[in-house]
Amino acid sequence: DGQRLFSIAVSRVQHLHLLAQRLFSDFESSLQTEEQRQLNKIFLQDFCNSDYIISPIDKHETQRSSVLKLLSISYRLVESWEFPSRSLSGGSAPRNQISPKLSELKTGILLLIKASEDGAELFPDSSALQLPPYGNYYQSLSADESLRRTYELLACFKKDMHKVETYLTVAKCR
Amino acid sequence: MKKAVELVLLLLLLFFTPHIMGKRYSPPGKPTLTRCRSPEKETFTCWWEPGSDGGLPTTHALYYRKESSERVYECPDYHTAGENSCFFNKNDTSIWVNYNITVVATNTLGSAFSDPVDVDVVYIVKPNPPEKQTVTIMEDKGWPFLRVSWEPPQKADTRSGWITLIYELRVKLEEENEWEMHLAGHQKTFNIFSLRSGGKYLVEVRCKPDHGFWSEWSSTSYIKVPDYFHREKSVWILLTIFSAFIFLILTWLLHMNSRSLKNCILPPVPGPKIKGFDNQLLKNGKSDEIFSALMVSNFPPTTSSNYEDLLVEYLEVYVPVEQELMQEESKDLHGGCLKCERSTSDSDSGRGSCDSHTLLMDKCGETKEEGRHTDRASSRMLTEAQRHQKGWEKDTLTYAHGDMVSPDMSNGRVKTWPSVFSPLPQYSSNPLDKQSSLEMAKQHCLSTSSCLTQPGHSTKEALGPSNWDFCLGNKQPHLLHPQTQVGRQLQAHSEVNISNIGRKQAPAGLQSPALRSTEYVEVQRVNEEDLVLLQPVVSGCGRIEGYPQMPKGKDYSKVKGVDSDNMLLLQREVMEEDWWTGNCYTSSTVNTTQKPTACIHTAMPVQGDMALAMNGYVDTATMCTLPTC
């Protein structure tokens, strides 16, 4: 049942988003004010690792996209975070739970894709192409910038999770 | 020259004019962005606060930059959202994109930049309040409740799922101050129960997106609950009437059965009823009649009449060869003591004098004296007394059992202690013997008493009354029946022993148990040396094994006779062995001789056998009831 699958996926991604939010706010509160300002400035110049994935950025675009497209985008987004989520800092249990949850969510989205029409066509084993060109992006950074890296990670993760949540919700209501 | 001066003057004027005017122009102050909000996640607005304008007309401009792009845009719309605001329409709004917004204030003298603010539209959503709110009263099985329903704000696109909202409502009575909050979740209707009849309620609703801010409260809806108290009232009225009815019935029932109930709950306390006591008389207040009514004609027992004679006159005793201890002082003593005894038997007599040891002692002393002088008479009396022995059944005339000198001879009873009484083989009274026995008894008494007192017996006084009892244990060993001498020895022995005994234990060997004033010794046997071996009996339970149970009751010893020493010899009837079950005898053995026939009567609670025959029996154990174990 499509609706049931959607509901499950939506609830899972909502949970992930909440986790991401909590992680980010915890991190931010642990920063000094000085650092916070600097990070804010810096962040604008950098970009998330998932920026290569073209995704609708407003409602109009989103509504214009098909369910399948939305699902595929969501899938890619989730996939892109599978690996980096392991290095998410936080020092608490949620960090360890994120990666498996992402995997589960990915599976769920895949199911949804297959359940919808034209699903099989969209994935001609293109996962290889989807690997981020900056696969080692985060590893390349030096240790001095770990703080900045953490901030970026958390902010990007939070944003991406919200994206997926929105897309799935829209797709579900379609 | 003139021109130069004019120029200078002009310049000066220019400069000074503002100074004279008191005004200063300065570049504008720094503006600040106060907030940015998006009502539906499709557009957003930012507001700022201008700083000081520096006295000059100042203009403000908002510039923003999208993330990862250096291009600077200016605010597309300054007017839609009001003053000092910038409205970003759909086309200009991008979700999940960081906006870096700055406001610049400019006047002729300069400009000022505000601090930049980063905005992500997703996180600044604050929807409009819910709309089309309705409140209606509905009924659930006669009980009303409120149903509140609303619509999401128009702009928010919840249908497509672009934005999801959760709702919250609050209710309160008009006169109250505190709101009652209810979280409604994603639903758009809500029911409120437990309403106050006739109350007026206020209802408000608000909403919030998944990640965003709460909206403002919607406009208030008023609703008045109709009165349903009327219906409640009728029920209460019915209930009241019904309960009143029940109550009346119960009252009537109670009234009908009041008497029996009273008896059941409060049973009447039985009042004291004295036979012959007439309450009416008491009420009338004539004491004479009352007390006369109380008096029973034949109280005290009529047999006492015989006793009277006996007491006053003589005591009939046997005077066998052996000494029987017959107190003729015993007579008097008896009389006195008997009287006392009798009186003491009446615990209510109030004649405490007889209960006091000292008094008895005095009496005994007196009687002794008198006794001496009245030998003759006493002998006669003794004979008669003996005859009347029958009548003595229960009386405490002669106590054959010695009670013991115990400090707490509270009863003060006179107890005889025919400890070494020898059995009286016959009842025949020999006047002479009697006399002698009486004398002897007297002397015994005296001696005994002296004997007893000599050792400095602690319980001298206590012994007083029983002194003559101890006459039994007198010097002269006449007690033994067959052999006088032996008996004498026995007597002496016993006397000494008794005295010893008495000495040993403070309240004397013949100590009474705590509760009773009598001590009992159990004669174990009589050995060949004519020694009666007495055995202390375990208090209360002293029964020699094998010995038949003695029927409890009056303990009697048969008066065998009065020996030459004027001692009353009591005989135990059944003579298998010299076994007496004594109670709680704590003394050492008193040796007596003679087995077969010499029945030495100790002051026992001679039980059973002795008590059987009434004739010629003296109650040896009147005073000593069975000691409590």
Image: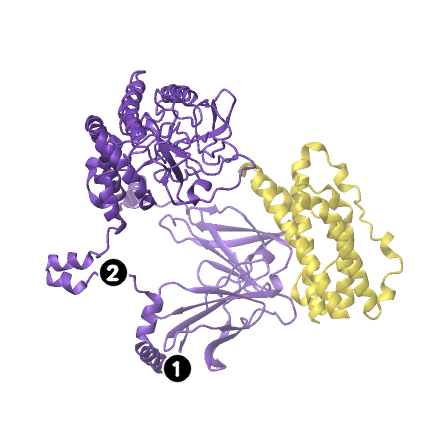
Query: Label 1 belongs to which residue?
Result: B235
Residue at x 30%, y 41% (from the top left corner): B12
Q: Amino acid at mark 2?
A: Lys
Tag in front: 2 or 1? 2
Q: Nearer the viewer, residue B339 or B111?
A: B339
As drawn, which residue projects farthest toward the top?
Answer: B455
The three-letter amino acid code for the residue at tag 1 is: Val
Indicate the quadrant containing the C terminus of chain A: top left, top right, bottom left or bottom right: bottom right
State which quadrant residue B474 falls in.
Answer: top left
| Residue corresponding to mark 2 | B275
Quadrant containing the N terminus of chain A is: bottom right
The chain coloured purple carries which letter?
B
Q: Which mark is residue B162?
A: none
| Residue at image location 46% in from the left, 79% down from the top | B143
Along the line of sight, the residue nearer the viewer: B196 or B126:
B196
B625 in relation to B319, above or below? below
- Label 1's element? helix
Which image quarter: residue B283? Answer: bottom left
Q: Give whichever of B419, B8 is nearer the camera.
A: B419
- Percent coordinates x, y for residue B170 in the rendering: 45, 67
- Contact (Cβ within 8 Å) of mark 2 with mark 1: no
Residue B372 location (% of width, % of height) = 22, 26
Foreground residue, B259 or B462? B462
**Structural crowding at the residue carrying mark 2, measured as other residues with C-alpha within 10 Å and reported as few (<14), some (14–19) or many (≥20):** few
Quarter-wise, where is residue B587 in the image?
top left
Q: CA distance from mark 2 to mark 1?
A: 65 Å
What colour do you see for chain A? yellow
Q: Chain of mark 1?
A: B
Q: Is residue A110 visible to the viewer in this orientation of the structure? A: yes
In the rendered view, tell whether residue B443 sits above or below residue B611. above
